[in-house]
Image: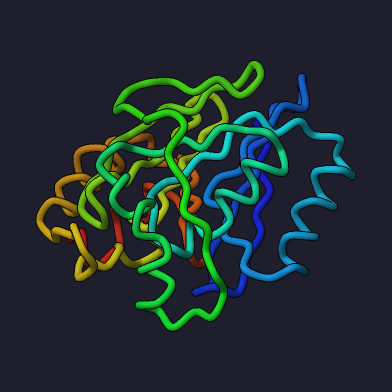
Amino acid sequence: MKIAKFEFSLFGINTYIVVDPDTLKAAIIDPGMSTESEEKAIKDFIAKENLRITHIINTHLHIDHAISDKMASELFDAPIYAHADDEFLGERISQQSLMFGLNRRISEFSISSYLFDGEEISIGTGKLKVLHVPGHSPGSVALYDKEDKFVITGDALFAGSIGRTDLPGGNHSQLINSIKSKLLTLPDDTIVYPGHGPATTIGREKRSNPFLL
């Protein structure tokens, strides 16, 4: 599958669109659009590429990754997927907006379908494998495309860093264990697309990430 990256203003969130080029079916990963211009950028890209959005998938439900879940779900008539252990975060999305001083009124939403560790999500003819990687949040997941050699890690693993664990449900030792058992076991040439910042590879993080040495 092919992947398009959008960097949006709310905490520099990376929103991804994963596309099956054979069917033009696609998934929006972590819809972080917080302004009308950012929403327009996503809509224009989808219209230009003639894509059909079949899934709205969250790596986790912190506000920067889920602020536009309800909008995207309604606009593209697509269900919202997330891990059940993060459902409490989705239910408190308005409280999260107040905690971070956001003026925008955020609509509450419900998870349409739960993600489970090890399941494969079909995007057209492509597949994303769900890897449960708790620690940054209880329900954090990564999405692994074995065939095209990439993994979307949300806020679990970054280039040279890892996710913070001081937010509700965070656990540092759990996060380290998740990364080492679920992510660093992937092939070294797997491209890592994180929730913030630049892409990296599994091999590079195994060799040089100071939090994992």
Relative to 111, does residue 45 appear above or below in the rendering?
Answer: below
On screen, 40 above or below 153?
Answer: below
Q: Residue at x 63, y 62 (%)?
A: 33
Total numbered labels = 0
Q: Is residue 196 above or below residue 82?
A: below
**Rendering coords of residue 32 (x, y %):** 57, 60
Residue drawn 68% across and 36% down? 2
The single residue placed furthest to the top in the displayed view is 125
Q: Quadrant of the C terminus?
A: bottom left
- Where residue 110 sits in the image (x, y, percent)? 43, 42
Residue 150 appears in the rendering: yes
Figure quadrant of residue 184: top left
The residue closer to the viewer here, 212 or 122, is 122
Which one is nearer the viewer's eye here, 111 or 136?
A: 111
212 sits left or right of 36 in the view = left
Q: Residue furthest left?
A: 173
Q: Quadrant of the N terminus?
A: top right
Q: Is residue 199 visible?
A: no
Could you tell whether 119 is left or right of 174 in the image?
right
Say how the picture is coloured.
rainbow
Q: Residue at x 47, y 47 (%)?
A: 109
Please give left or right for residue 194 compared with residue 170 in the image. Answer: right
